[in-house]
Image (tube, rainbow, N blue to C red):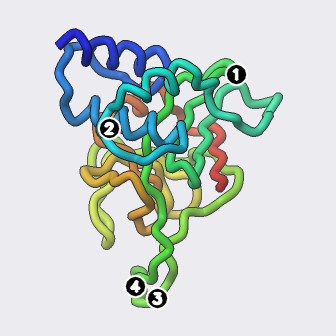
């Protein structure tokens, strides 16, 4: 209804919501609410409370590292589990992620390795449309930034680190990102 439309509009204006303003509190709206809660450093739930309105209205946007020579880039905040797309020096989109969970798993050669998302400064060097199936599972529309690590769509993007090291985004956000990212775009991953 009208209250959900107002919420969708407010989240869209703040960069959290990229879908039709339809007044329906569906999966995409719930996922955007979780992203707002991540950004505000409050409990990561899909429930919108009356207090959240004031918090969202006062949200100044993320504090990102200054990169004077990179007006277009991706910033991945592993602490908040959020991806920020910076365009022309401003945050254009804020997307929830799930990164490496720190647990041990067997890699392709059977060696035990820790599920850790690489930190540092990278650039996208390869992109695939559609699904890539690896020994760890499916990667939807992956954008590779370091070795086999990619930002990619997934049906499972819980509000906490759960991956083998990749940066998961919801599948519909992967569709959106495919229209605005490019090979060679800088990617920065930090805690």
Q: Which mark is residue 23?
A: none
Name the mark on residue 31: 2
Q: CA distance from mark 3 to mark 1?
A: 40 Å
Q: CA distance from mark 4 to mark 3?
A: 4 Å
Q: Residue at x 36, y 13 (%)?
A: 9
For the residues bearing labels 4 and 3, Cβ distance under 8 angstroms: yes
Judge whether 142 appears above or below 74 on screen: below
In terms of sequence position, does the residue under pointer 3 or pointer 1 come before the other?
Answer: 1
Q: Of marks 2 and 3, which one's residue comes earlier in the chain?
A: 2
Q: Position of residue 100 (x, y in %)?
A: 48, 65
Name the residue furthest front.
51
Q: Residues within 10 Å of mark 1 (few under 14, many from 20)?
A: some
Residue placed under numbered mark 3 in the picture: 112
- Mark 1 or mark 4: which comes first in sequence? 1
- In the rendered structure, the answer to whether residue 122 lies left or right of residue 116 reads right
Quote the CA–CA distance across marks 2 and 4: 30 Å
Label 4 packing within 10 angstroms: few (<14), some (14-19), many (20+): few
User: Which residue is located at x 34 percent, y 54 percent?
Assistant: 158
Q: x%, y% of residue 10? A: 41, 15
Is there CB contact under 8 Å for labels 2 and 1? no
Res. 136 image quadrant: bottom left
Q: Name the residue furthest right.
A: 68
Q: Is residue 142 visible?
A: no
Q: Which residue is mark 1?
A: 89
Badge 3 marks a residue whose secondary structure is: strand
């Amino acid at each position: 209804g009208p209250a959900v439309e107002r919420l969708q509009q407010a989240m869209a204006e703040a960069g959290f919501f990229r879908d039709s303003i339809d007044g329906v509190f569906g999966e995409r709206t719930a996922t955007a609410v979780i992203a707002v809660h991540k950004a505000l450093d409050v409990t990561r739930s899909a429930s919108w409370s009356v207090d959240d309105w004031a918090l969202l209205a006062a949200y100044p946007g993320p504090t990102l590292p200054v990169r004077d020579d990179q007006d277009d880039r991706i910033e991945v905040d592993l602490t908040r589990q959020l991806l920020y797309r910076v365009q022309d020096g401003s945050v254009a989109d804020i997307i929830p992620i799930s990164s490496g969970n720190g647990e041990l798993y067997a890699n392709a050669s059977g060696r035990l390795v820790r599920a850790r998302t690489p930190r540092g400064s990278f650039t996208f060097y390869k992109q695939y449309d559609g699904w890539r199936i690896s020994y760890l599972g499916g990667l939807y529309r992956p954008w590779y930034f370091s070795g086999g690590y990619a930002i990619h769509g997934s049906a499972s993007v819980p509000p906490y680190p759960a991956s083998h090291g990749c940066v998961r985004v919801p599948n519909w956000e992967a569709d959106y990102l495919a229209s605005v990212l490019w090979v060679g775009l800088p990617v920065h991953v930090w805690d």
